[in-house]
Every structure is written in C-alpha cells, then in structure tokens.
Image (spheres, grey):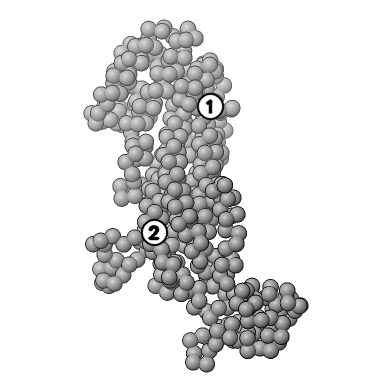
Amino acid sequence: MVPRYSRPAMTAIWSAENRYRIWFEIEALACEAMANLGTIPRESAQNIRRRGDEAMAAFSDADLARIDEIEAETRHDVIAFLTWLAEKIGDDSRFVHLGMTSSDVLDTCLSVQLVQATDLLLKDMDVVLAALKKQAFAHKNTVTIGRSHGIHAEPTSFGLKMAGHYAEFARNRKRLETARSEIAVCAISGAVGTFAHLDPKVEAYVAEKLGLSCEDVSTQIIPRDRHAAYFCALAVTASAIERLATEVRHLQRSELREAEEFFHPGQKGSSAMPHKRNPVLSENLTGLARLVRSAIVPALENVTLWHERDISHSSVERNLAPDATIGLDFALMRLADMMDKLLIYPERMEANLNALGGVVHSGEVLLALAKAGFSREDAYRLVQKHAMATWTLLGKPEGRSFRENLLSDPEVTQHITPSALDAAMRSENHLVAVDDIFKKVFGA
C-alpha cells in the first residue's frame, strides 16, 4: 500500500526487519525445543539464542543488503536468511533449521504477522464503535426521514441509523476475532508434513511460545482455506465501511445537507469552485473498501494448490496480506475520525421530512382508517389518491398538504376526526421502539 494510505504501526508488521525477527524467533524456539528433547546440545541452542538475539538487536540496512546479496545468488529467501544467520552464529548454526522446511518458517511467520495485524484492526474497530455509539446516543431521538430506493419512506431517528451501523461493526469485530483464531496456527512438520525428521513436540513448543495452535494436518503448508476465510472477514468489514461512507455521501448531497464531513479551516474543496465542500473522506473510504475486497478472489484461488504444495500462492500473499491489512487499518481509523467529527443538521432533517407535504405519514394514516372501519383495500385507495394528489402538485399554487387533501374528502372525515388524523401524522410515533432497539444493540 502506498504511504498515503498507510499507518506506521501496521506498515512495520510487514517490514523485512519484522519478518526476519519472526523467522529467527521460530528457528531459535525450534532449537530450544530440540535441546529439551536431547536432539541437539543445550549449549548450542543457548548459543544460537544469544548470538541470534544480538544480531537481531543490531540489525541494520547493511544486514538487509547482505541478505539480499546472498539471495541474488541462491534465489531462495529462507536459505539467504539462514546463511546470513550462520555468519552471525558460527559453528552451532548447523543445528538451525534441523529437519525443517522453508514453509515451516514462512507459514508460521505469516500466521504471526496476521495475528499482529488483526490485533491492530481490533483496536481500530473499537475506536469506530466508540464514535458510532457517541453519535447514536447523541441523536437517539433526532427525527429524520427514512428512505427506501432513495425515496422518502417513513420517519426514523438519526441515532437509530447510527445504531444500525454500530451493530454491523460489532458483528464484524466478532468476525475478525474468529478470523484471528483461525489464522493463529503453527506448522513445524517438515517437508511434506509427516514429522519424519522432527518430533511433533517441537511444533507444540514453538506454537505455545508464539501464542499459536498447531495445524491439524499441514501437508507442507498451512491449508489456505484458513487464509481465504481471513481475507473474506476483512472484505466484509470493508463493505461495512463502504455502506456507512455511502450513507454519509448521500446525506451530504446539496439537496439533502442533513450531515456532512467536518470541513477544516483552510481546507479547499475545489481548485475551480471556491464554494465546494465535497465528501472526500467518504469517497476515499469507498475506494479503499474496493481495494480490500479485491483480496477475496485471489485468496480463494490460493486454496487450490498442487498436491502437498506449490508456490502459486506465495507471490499473491506477499502483496495481498500487507495491502489488505494496511488498507483496512487506514480505512477504519479514517472512518472513526470522520464519524466522530461528523457535522449533523437536525433542522435540515426536519425540513426534508416535511418537504413532501406530509405524505410520509401515509402508512400511519392507512392504519388509522383501517382501525376506523375501512377495509384495507379501501383505506389504501383513499390514502394513495390523496398522497398522489399532494405529490403531483407540490410547490404549485394550487397544491395542498396531504392533511388538507384528506380532510377535504367527506369519505375520510365521516370516519376519522382531524385530531385523530393529526395523532396519526406525528413523527414521534415512529420512535416508540427506539429504546427497545437500543437495548438490543448496546445492552440495558
């Protein structure tokens, strides 16, 4: 991911230095386990740990260059690292990587990195949830118009809108927790996963020290269905970001102006039109969500590998894993800041709610007429007739409100009084269950 859409903490997880630190940790832990089992001398394991720790503590650009130099000749990244490590450790390096294969290091390292990345994403999610909860409670009873198909439907509350997004992100947080658990696996099982040259206790030791579980059956690799499920969880979260960003974009449209992104002092909206206040953050989030979701297809295609393993997945994951996690990390934090500072305009919500002359209350009027003795079909016919008359003449001199049209009809007034009609057309009728919904979402 380009620096413009990256945050340092997440980027550091995918740095070469962090990768090599994890590789060494895996190798050192495996040596400790083998020493505990008597497979290699304990003194050698201690020497590997001590000298390796010293080398990693002093790791510099020169070390990166040396590993790259070796890889240019060997054309194998793990061998290049092991050769560099041998230069630092000395004779005891012959016990490093004993009985192991490259994927034991690569796949276990990727698991560690994905766990580290997910821990950051979960923290990001908590910040998003806090911002949404704040807006939900602040506008719990702020009446606004609900829309279906982009058309005015019935009143709702802006806080309820926010509560819905909160509930969605809470579900996505659980999905990320599940994805973290599924990806947090270790494989130290040798060339084709048979432990032919390794005691399974080595894998168990390394897994415990790294906070991972052991893969049930690791051919030569950790099966990629785990990774596919992981990136699907990221993609669903990205879709939640886009859904909320799209809502903000719509609410900020000039015709609505019910909410808008915070406009910073000195910010410019357009190089040509000084009046512009564009929804640039939410549009940016829409684009980032598309990038994160683009990980799904290659992740699913990586599940199908030849026999015990090929490397068709490798080049994909070297790009996909950093980009998807870095992109989602940036998007979540941008979303959290945007929603925390969102400018909300209740007066515009009220104006828009009343903009159609009261026809948004047609559903309540329909129910009131049915309760007054009309068949549902007759009630619907009457209400629709007057709603369409109101809608058609909106803004014209001869136009009347929905209430006026209804009260001009003797068929209506014979069955319902003006006060009963007014009671049916109160926006607050639509908020009676908001407390119950909030309890479901946020608890008692």
Residue 364 relative to residue 144: left or right: right
Q: Nearer the viewer, mark 1 or mark 2?
A: 2
User: Which amino acid lies under the numbered mark 2 shown in the image of this protein?
Assistant: Leu
Q: Residue at x 45, y 34 (%)?
A: 115
Question: Please, is residue 87 above or below residue 178 in the view?
Answer: above
Question: Please, is residue 231 above or below residue 284 in the view?
Answer: above
Q: Nearer the viewer, residue 225 or 141?
A: 141
Q: How many marks?
A: 2
> How far apart are labels 1 and 2 at the CA level?
42 Å
Mark 2 crowdedness (10 Å alpha carbons): few <14, some 14-19, many ≥20 = some
Q: Which of 291 and 88 is in front in this view?
A: 291
Answer yes or no: is residue 287 visible: no
First of labels 1, 2 by sequence position: 1
The residue singled out by tag 1 in the image is 213
Q: Which residue is drawn at 41% across and 66% down?
A: 345
User: Which amino acid lies under the numbered mark 1 shown in the image of this protein?
Assistant: Ser
The residue singled out by tag 2 in the image is 342
Mark 1 crowdedness (10 Å alpha carbons): few <14, some 14-19, many ≥20 = many
Q: Which of 184 and 78 is in front in this view?
A: 184
Which percent across, then down, holds residue 288? 41, 53
